[in-house]
Amino acid sequence: MKRSRRARTIRPGHEPRLAPGVRGYTVWSHGELYVPLVIADHEGRGDVARYLDTLPTDRVVKFPTVVSVRLIDMLLRRGFAWATEMTPHGPCELLVRCP
């Protein structure tokens, strides 16, 4: 008998901890890691940069709809590139790094 997993309710301000000083969400889909939300507990301390450096380099990693200029710059410095992905709701701009 196959168990179904219950989806967790997304509650702003209660995001899970991704790393020390970093909260947000990650989702694995078809072998690719999506990171739709990253929040620093304290901006400017380097916690998000350290988290980005721990992301897998042997898998595709995608950051959809990035609106923070600071995060865009950090991702571009780490080899991410702009791409567009079709979704059921239309095209989505994202930053992607492939192995």
Image (cartoon, helix red, strand yellow):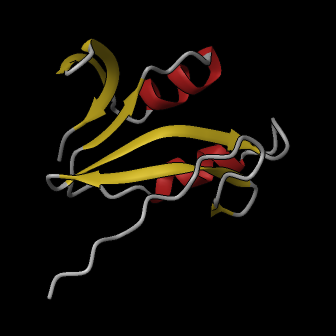
Residue 13 in the image: state x and y as whole percent. Answer: 78, 45
Q: 61 or 24, which is in the foreground?
A: 24
- Residue at x 44%, y 51% (from the top left corner): 26
- Residue 77, percent from left and from top: 45, 28
Q: Classify residue 47 as left or right of residue 62.
A: right
Q: Which residue lies most toward the front here?
A: 1
- The residue furthest top is 90
- For the point 60% across and 53% down, the residue is 50
Q: Is residue 69 above or below residue 46?
A: above
Tally of numbered discs: 0
Vertical comparison of 86 with 36: above or below? above
The answer to which quarter of the image holds residue 69 is top right
Position of residue 61 measured from the top left corner of the image (x, y, whole percent): 30, 44
Q: Position of residue 62 (x, y in %)?
A: 32, 36
**Image-based side of 89 in relation to 73, left or right:** left
Residue visible at 44% across and 20% down in the picture: 65
Residue toward you, 53 or 85: 85
- Residue situated furthest right in the rendering: 42
State whether residue 71 is above or below residue 89: below
Location of the N terminus by quadrant is bottom left
Q: Residue furthest bottom?
A: 1
Q: Is residue 27 shown left or right of residue 99?
A: right
Residue at 49% over, 52% down:
53
